[in-house]
Image: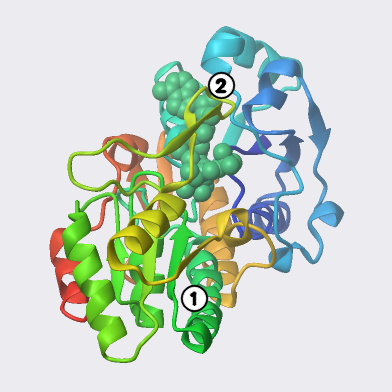
Amino acid sequence: MKIGLLTSGGDCPGLNAVIRGVVLKGDRIYEHEFVGIKDGFRGLVEDDIVSLPRKKVRGLSKVGGTILGTSRISPIRTGGVERVKEVMDKHEIDALVAIGGEGTLTVARMFHDEGINVVGVPKTIDNDLSATDRTFGFDTAVSIATESIDRLRTTGEAHSRCMIVEVMGRHVGWIALHAGIASGAHAILIPEVPVAPEQLCEWVQNAMDRGRAPTIVVAEGFTFAGTEQVSSDRVDGFGRPLLGGIGEAVTRMVEERTGIETRNTTLGHLQRGGVPSSYDRVLATRFGTAAIDSVSAKKWGTMVALQGMDIVNVNLRDATNEIKTVPRDQWDEAAIMFG
Ligand SMILES: Nc1ncnc2c1ncn2[C@@H]1O[C@H](COP(=O)(O)OP(=O)(O)OP(=O)(O)O)[C@@H](O)[C@H]1O
Ligand SMILES: O=P(O)(O)OC[C@H]1O[C@](O)(CO)[C@@H](O)[C@@H]1O
Ligand SMILES: [Mg+2]
């Protein structure tokens, strides 16, 4: 079989390890041929496709980013499924492995419905995909965020300041929750749970009164009860507003209301760049080798997923019907330690 690989949506540590896993097993065990589609769906519409022999994936499991490039360009809006089929036919591509988050896999599902052979691999640092216990990239992002919060804590203590840390998480607070628990934050603010400014200031004041430097982790998608998401007037490649700025808003509010000197740090793309953790390398490699098994078994319209310790196949529809949010009881468990 001739198989096209693409990475789409935000990049994520472990993408290259998936590519390596797919190509190595596909070459050794199944003798498939591979091509790389450049910059996600852009390459599929604009016919930007390169050969992907085994030698191109050497040593890739520890390399950040993606050798194929990525984008947020929609094939549905730009060329449509007919154009995708035309390009695939031209290159005699039998099947696609689409490595991406909920948006990419929604498009993969649309492709499947239109008769294109496709298997999905779940990626995102946000960990917001249903039907898989984990996405690769999440562990790395949490490690980077945790280390950063630990560092901010010592400078906060030196100055008796309140430190606010904004982490990624457009719709969900998984990174904030895990990094916040790991670093012993005094409050964790996530999109799933509205919190009143008065409550936050009480936690900040309590921590200060006990001689601690209050440390607050806030996910970019968080909003105070009854307020709008903070976003910029700029949009991403798909036309959605860029988020970010809630950390600064929380900082000003805390300083104004409590009088405690407060500083904001937005971790941003530091959470996505650089080498994947060993956990993410292993998970991504397992996803890659399982994905080529799925392709070889013609399990079209499915996604590889982690359930417990096992890699399984799930329907793309189950993976993309709704995003996986943080359950309220998990936030409540953490909230016992706030303040
Ligand atoms: N419903 C849709 N209709 C058409 N195109 C879509 C749709 N959803 C997503 N896409 C396309 O798929 C691309 C990838 O989706 P998206 O940008 O959300 O990244 P993702 O795969 O979800 O990863 P991330 O976790 O970074 O968001 C989008 O930028 C857009 O071009
Ligand atoms: O700067 P970009 O690439 O648009 O990505 C930002 C988005 O990517 C994500 O990290 C998901 O990868 C979101 O949490 C965030 O809103
Ligand atoms: Mg998305």
Q: Mark 2 — residue? A: 74
In the displayed structure image, the side of residue 309 where residue 40 appears, left or right: right
Q: Whole-Å distance between the Cαs marked 2 and 1?
A: 36 Å
Foreground of the two, 232 or 122: 232
Q: Left or right? Give the position of 286 relative to 1.
A: left
The kind of residue tagged 2 is Ser
The residue drawn where x is 74% and y is 38% is: 36
Observer-side mark, 2 or 1, equals: 1
Q: Horizontally, is 119 left or right of 226 in the view?
A: right
Q: Residue at x 13, y 66 (%)?
A: 329
* Label 2: how many Cα within 10 Å (few below 14, some 14–19, many 20+): many
Residue 127 x, y percent position in the rendering: 40, 55
The amino acid type found where label 1 is placed reads Ile
Q: Which residue is mark 1?
A: 149
Q: Is residue 198 above or below residue 39?
A: below
Mark 1: which secondary structure? helix
Q: Position of residue 168 (x, y in %)?
A: 47, 53
- Specify whether tag 2 is near ligand 1 (CB below 8 Å): yes
268 over 310 or under it: above or below? above
